[in-house]
Amino acid sequence: RENNPNRSRRSGLVVRIEASTVSFTDCLIRRNITKDFFRAADLPNSPGVDFVGIVVYAGDLAMEEDGFRVGDRVGCVYQFLGGNARFVSLPAKYCVEVPHDLNACEATCLMRSYLAAIQILYRVGGSEGKIEEGDKVLVTGANGSMGRAVIELAKLSGAKVYASCRREHKDFIKNTVGADVWLDEDPGMWQNLEMDIVVDLVCFTGDFRDTQLALADDGVKMVCAGKAKQERDEISLQQAQNEEFNELYAEKTDSFEYLAMGGLCGLHVGVPQKEDIYEKAFLPGLCGAVLKEVPTPWSSTVLEYDLFESIEERPDLMAEDLELLFSLLRENKIRPIIARIVGLDDVVKAHSYIEGGATQGTIVCQP
């Protein structure tokens, strides 16, 4: 945040939102299930970590230093952006230019999931960690928006993709998304697969041990970019606690007392998490927060990727990668799968739908 309010106004933009996504990330932030990948939100906080929209106001410094003008189309991805809205005010330095000829709903799908996917496959691990044609790639949590993006970009690179997700998503992942091999959510099925690259978005065991066993001895890298199993377990715990709370206080008439005790909207502070065994650090030359090489009984090197820290550390690479993704979208080489388009009034329902785990495609909000 700018310490000088005047400079903040002069270097800022006001953007009329065309489209933003509703994501599992938004659910985690709303529920304060931050774990290792997010810090707790300052309240009040609006959901939506990305957007594509049109600049309706540009401060003089935003024009002089960042080159933006009223009428420009811009996009942004940021942890506490508040993209599910009609307008957003933010510093110009967080924005990138978005071509006017692209569909807004499709373009906003690239801002988070596809950006993370391209950096996982091409940036994390440096030059030696880039995906190559013929690589075997395992993706866990493949039916999520980031998993689908990893599959699509890996296939575009000529890799053979093994995708793990729940059985009800098998046909969708193979026939619609394009994975070569479907695997059940059983880590025992992954052992001895001799993968070149493993992208773990689930962390079934809490320490990535079982997923790492799928990596070949001379494998390129294993990237841990999510802990969906633990996060979904905590969501279930919160839902059970909220149901119990609602039963206990169903006859309470004091709405202020009810709100103060945390029974509304899932604004529930999760139980403290045990500290991770890894030490986070930015390694020179890498895009994204990764983990130092920490010896363990089961692994010599594990890389952990955090999109938001990556953007903070290297915004120039974010702009470069998004420019490539926009080109691929224009050339129909990638095509985000949109499950549904909702208005602002339906964002709450969209959160419930996502938390139920039934999503096949990205939910996009158009105000």
Image (cartoon, grey):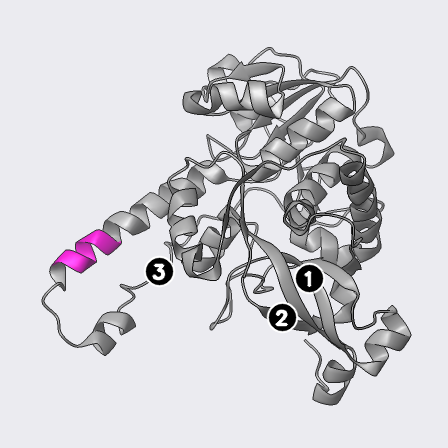
Image quadrant assignment for residue 226: top right
> Real-space Cα distance between discs 1 and 3?
31 Å
The residue sitting at 48% across, 15% down in the picture is: 188
- Can residue 184 be seen? yes
Answer yes or no: do the residues labelled 2 and 1 have beta carbons within 8 Å?
Answer: yes
Q: Is residue 244 magenta?
A: yes
Q: Nearer the viewer, residue 294 or 349?
A: 349
Magenta region: 242-247
Label 2, on which residue? 88
Label 3, on which residue? 268
Q: Amino acid at mark 1?
A: Gly
Q: Secondary structure at mark 1?
A: strand
The residue sitting at 59% across, 14% down in the picture is: 181
Q: Amino acid at mark 2?
A: Val
Closest to the camera, between mark 2 and mark 1, is 1
Closest to the camera, between mark 1 and mark 3, is 1
